[in-house]
Amino acid sequence: AQTVTQSQPEMSVQEAETVTLSCTYDTSESDYYLFWYKQPPSRQMILVIRQEAYKQQNATENRFSVNFQKAAKSFSLKISDSQLGDAAMYFCAYRSEGKTSGSRLTFGEGTQLTVNP
Amino acid sequence: GAGVSQTPSNKVTEKGKYVELRCDPISGHTALYWYRQSLGQGPEFLIYFQGTGAADDSGLPNDRFFAVRPEGSVSTLKIQRTERGDSAVYLCASSLFPGGTYEQYFGPGTRLTVT
């Protein structure tokens, strides 16, 4: 079974600075997707960024980028120019492309990000 | 367009009671997922529907939990003989198709409290 680990329960960053959230995962599969989701107090999960395992190039979405290290099974999220609206719980998630696991998401425990003005 | 909606937003029930939680997916989405999020943890998969059928129900914790999607759109998660340990936020998500590059869109969840 796949597992996702986020070792930082809480992180803080000054507004306009850069912060990196860590995520590691365990899998024996070669084809999969990795995601970062943001969950504000409203509880609504919002997709931040996605990475296909077969792509070597790291995904970027505006101020958000990832460092995907497939051999090390590491998938960190970098937030540049942090804004007050970035404050939320961030979840790393894994999705298999295998038939046995279907298309379910496996989530980590989350990292609570605080942005200080 | 409308996103995924879930009703009720909050539900308080007594131990031993039966509850139903409803999910309205995005129109046209064929895949629907239920997750459970306990306090301070990440969501855990419960069940996934492709159309009307449950394609994967391996995450349901026991036989007190059951879900249906009779017409391939709205889904209801049913919990019998509720226990205090069932208290959590129940999240629903839908995607146009399962897997691939299709994104799962989440609803705001139903917070269930069993007293």
Image: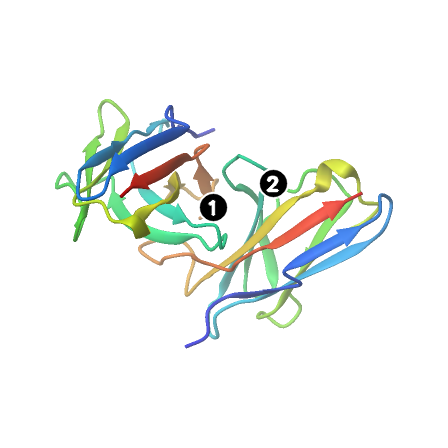
Q: Quadrant of the C terminus of chain A?
A: top left
Q: Residue at x 49, y 55 (%)?
A: A42
In this rendering, the answer to whether A21 lies above or below A51 is above
Q: Position of residue A70 (x, y in %)?
A: 22, 29
Q: Position of residue A26 (x, y in %)?
A: 37, 25
Say which quarter of the image contains residue A77. top left
Q: Residue at x 66, y 42 (%)?
A: B60
Distance from the alpha carbon under mark 2 to that under mark 1: 10 Å
Residue A96 as seen in the image, left or right of residue A31: right
Q: Secondary structure at mark 2?
A: loop
Q: Residue at x 29, y 29 (%)?
A: A22
Residue A81 as seen in the image, left or right of residue B76: left
Q: Residue furthest right?
A: B16
Say which quarter of the image contains residue B52. bottom right
Residue A77 as seen in the image, left or right of residue B41: left
Q: Amino acid at mark 2?
A: Gly
